[in-house]
């Protein structure tokens, strides 16, 4: 019986293809204006693989059976890859294409008077489900690659105009005297441009990390106390005198000055953004024989334990952060920078005690 089913599938592949395409164009709006349906191109090959899987496999070697499975997988992945290139298609529509295919196969076999055994029906259903899985997985992977390329290209192209605007604004700033009403506005413009540039850099760095590349770290001897003072001085332009620095001036470390500065800027900015507006933000630096500790504390509502786990994930934000600006990448990058320095970062947050982000770095890297 299995050989009969296999023969009917091969004999009716053109009919199955025609019915499938008509239904797909009728039921999927994304396919209505497509000149070529991706699955159409590979459907005859897929049906041949399915027929081979249904036919009596007692006379086939394990190598031949495995080859058939790999070929079917290739068809599904090819379909998913091609579908991801169409802006109108979603993974749900991709899956629906296969559901239509399954229905059409059963419909045509029934019209041919073929009675399927349980084994044969299971093979068809399992094959379609595997094809759906392969296609959907490849669709997601390809779409992620496309989005990644778009993001990298966009952010890279944005850097040029932003730098030009910043240079022009800095030139304008030099023309103002102290007390000029336009001076404060120009300073704020430069601060806004710097924040925009930082957001673009965050996107670029997040893309590098997702691609499996490391951050650009240039280690040098760094006076961490002076670094904190410099960061706080810059942040005061934006947030006012909100920061209290508690630090031993003798603490130094061999680190990436640029990246550790990003850690401090991000954590300090977040502390202002999410803390009480009428309470100071404390930036504390201390050192033991084995570790250097950087703690940034703010008063305000605590971070629930169940949401702390997502804070360091890219593009994830807690409910309280939804109204705030940003990509949701800051803490993701902070964690990666700290870990690149062989350190760790922890959160301590409780009602009435505020929230502290504690970075622990080795005393010697």
Image: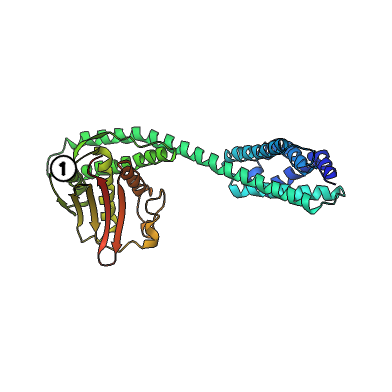
Front one among 68 and 144: 68
Point 37% across, 58% down: residue:
308
- How is the model colour-coded? rainbow
Percent across and percent down for residue 38 are 66, 38
- Left or right: residue 360 versus residue 6 is left
Is 277 above or below relative to 285?
A: below
Which residue position is annotated with label 1? 226
Point 35% across, 54% down: residue:
324
Percent across and percent down for residue 145 are 50, 38
Which residue occupies the extreme bottom position in the image? Answer: 352
Percent across and percent down for residue 183 are 18, 43
Q: Secondary structure at mark 1?
A: helix
Point 13% across, 48% down: residue:
248
| Mark 1 neighbour density, 10 Å: few (under 14) some (14–19) many (20 or more) | some
- Left or right: residue 16 versus residue 259 is right
Q: Which image quadrant for residue 355? A: bottom left
Instruction: Examine the rendering and report whether any part of residue 189 can be seen.
Output: no
Q: How many marks?
A: 1
* Quadrant (top left/top right/bottom left/bottom right) for the C terminus: top left
- Left or right: residue 103 versus residue 231 is right
Point 30% across, 34% down: residue:
163
Q: Which image quadrant for residue 78? A: top right
Front one among 323 and 286: 286
Percent across and percent down for residue 222 are 19, 38
Front one among 68 and 178: 68
Front one among 353 and 53: 53
Instruction: Examine the rendering and report whether any part of residue 223 can be seen.
Output: yes
- Left or right: residue 255 versus residue 45 is left
Which residue occupies the extreme right position in the image? Answer: 113
């Amino acid at each position: 019986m299995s050989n009969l089913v296999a023969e009917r599938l091969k004999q009716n592949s053109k009919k199955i293809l025609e019915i499938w395409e008509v239904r797909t164009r009728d039921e999927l709006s994304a396919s209505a204006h497509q000149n070529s349906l991706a699955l159409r191109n590979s459907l005859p090959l897929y049906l041949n693989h399915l027929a081979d899987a249904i036919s009596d496999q007692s006379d086939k070697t394990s190598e031949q059976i495995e080859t058939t499975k790999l070929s079917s997988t290739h068809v599904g992945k090819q379909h998913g890859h091609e579908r991801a290139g169409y802006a109108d298609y979603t993974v749900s529509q991709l899956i629906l294409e296969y559901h239509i295919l399954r229905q059409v196969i059963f419909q045509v076999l029934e019209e041919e008077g073929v009675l399927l055994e349980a084994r044969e029906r299971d093979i068809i259903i399992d094959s379609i489900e595997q094809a759906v899985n392969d296609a959907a997985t490849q669709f997601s992977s390809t779409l992620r690659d496309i989005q990644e390329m778009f993001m990298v290209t966009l952010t890279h192209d944005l850097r040029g105009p932003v730098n030009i605007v910043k240079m022009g604004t800095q030139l304008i700033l030099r023309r103002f005297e102290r007390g000029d009403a336009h001076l404060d506005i120009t300073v704020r413009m430069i601060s806004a441009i710097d924040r925009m540039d930082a957001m673009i850099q965050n996107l670029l760095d997040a893309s590098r990390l997702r691609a499996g590349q490391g951050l650009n770290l240039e280690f040098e001897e760094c006076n961490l106390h002076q670094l904190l003072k410099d960061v706080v001085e810059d942040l005061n332009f934006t947030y006012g005198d909100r920061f209290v620095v508690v630090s031993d001036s003798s603490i130094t470390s061999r680190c990436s000055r640029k990246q550790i500065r990003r850690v401090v800027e991000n954590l300090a900015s977040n502390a202002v953004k999410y803390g009480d507006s009428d309470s100071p933000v404390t930036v504390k630096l201390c050192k033991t024989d084995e570790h250097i500790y950087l703690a940034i504390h703010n008063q305000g509502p605590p971070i629930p334990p169940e949401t702390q786990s997502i804070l360091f994930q890219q593009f994830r934000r807690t409910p309280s952060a939804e109204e705030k600006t940003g990509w949701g990448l800051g803490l993701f990058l902070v964690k990666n920078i700290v870990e690149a320095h062989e350190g760790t970062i922890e959160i301590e947050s409780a009602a009435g005690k505020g929230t502290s982000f504690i970075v622990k770095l080795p005393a010697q890297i």
